[in-house]
Amino acid sequence: MAEVREFTLPDLGEGLTEAVIVQWLVEVGDVVAVDQPVVEVETAKAMVEVPCPYGGVVTARFGEEGAEVPVGAPLVTVAVGAAPDDLAGDAGGTPRAWGSPRSSGAGSGGGVESLVAGPGGPATAPAPTSPETGEAQDSGSGNVLVGYGTSNSSARRRRIRPGAPEGPAPLAAAAGPAPTTEADGTRTVAVISPLVRRLAREHGLDLRDVRGTGREGLILRTDVESEVRARAAREPVAGAAAGPVPGEERIPLKGLRGAAAEKFRRSRHEIPDATCWVDADATELLAVRRAMNVPGAPKVSLLALLARICTAALARYPELNATVDTAAQEIVRLPAVHLGFAAQTDRGLVVPVVRDAQDRTVEQLSAEIARLTDAARAGKLSPAELSHGTFTLNNYGVFGVDGSTPILNHPEAAMLGVGRIAAKPWVHEGELAVRQVVQLSFTFDHRVCDGGTAGGFLRYVADCVERPALLLRGM
């Protein structure tokens, strides 16, 4: 008799927990051979054709093209039960085309029609049996993708109880996940991926202690990784003293310091950042600043000039003035540049925000930066002046250092770092000269852009530092 088997989306590796159906490669009623691809899916890594480990007639498909399917969810059900040569192809081993079954003429061994229920009821062609046990043999593939296999174990085979009606299993019953299980007599643990079990073993984790977030409690790789992180957070640091050591000083991570520490932790935990850097000749930029600061005119700071360069660069590369909405899985590009700048105070590092920096002149930027810096040092910044920044300018050159790879100011997607400006040998107009050189670093969230965009932004900033007249273009 025919047996209906369910094929679920396997674990495609590297921690992927879902895939999007791009294209179905079979229709309901098509005949598939063992290991023929039945669907093309797109993961976060690549496009993949997923082969089915069973041969037979496709009786159902689950999910429309464009739908997101979690690992362990059903893809297709296949009615298995004809002789292997009827599924694998004609004599000589050449597989038949999908949806093009061979007719059940003389010598065909029964043909595909023996798999399909006729008007009188379900198909009754027997499945091949094992000469050792007399039980139906598993016609699954000997090949596997990560997360599924073709074991002959009873946990993967549908049994017919004595007295039960013959025929295919109801498709409604086959719609749920078919994970392998591990049990200890008190509860059953739903697992489907060998990677999940191996990861749990490597970390000494009992899967009975893990809550599965997959379909019907299926334990996913992310569930194991989350439990490992949670245990690490609960366990005390190895070698840590049970109490205070005489002479040591303990500083509570509270208030401003605690808020900054939490933001740094969250940034490194959530944002996949990367950094690129370049040296630039800032001699002309310093000359422009001196020319602007004539007697009687409002003073223009170097940080204000750099802020103006940043707003011009963000106008060219607006994808960097953004944040990532992790809940909605969307990149959010922001219409205004609220420019934060790092300021060191007696109470610690703060990042005041210049609102709508893109609409301010260099003089206005300089005045607002000076006002916010004074308020920061006096401890009088309001919450509004310390929040909702979209991009940060970090001038760590004031500490006498050349370079840095700073932590992004969560949830922002980018930060420009500026090192000290120092006299160094430099090739200028074809000749070696002593010039005022600065190292610029750019840290960015790799989710919002690739290296080409980041490099283009930094190169434009460096060009404006070296030739400030570029800022006049488009003004």
Image: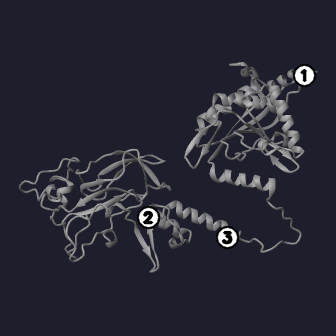
Asked where in the image residue 381 lies, by quadrant, the reply is top right
Residue 63: x and y in percent read 36, 50
Q: Residues within 10 Å of mark 3 (few under 14, many from 20)?
A: few
Do the CB atoms of the residues marked 3 and 2 lie less than 8 Å apart? no
Residue at screen point 82% across, 34% down: 421
| Pointer 3 residue | 235
C-alpha span from label 3 to label 1: 60 Å
Residue 102: x and y in percent read 14, 50
Q: How crowded is mark 1: few (under 14 residues within 10 Å), some or many (20 or more)?
A: few
C-alpha span from label 2 to label 1: 71 Å
N-terminal-most mark, 3 or 1: 3
| Pointer 1 residue | 297
> The residue under label 2 is which amino acid type?
Glu
Q: Please, which residue is most extreme toward the left here?
A: 106
Q: Quadrant of the C terminus?
A: top right
> The residue under label 3 is which amino acid type?
Glu
| Pointer 2 residue | 216
N-terminal-most mark, 2 or 1: 2
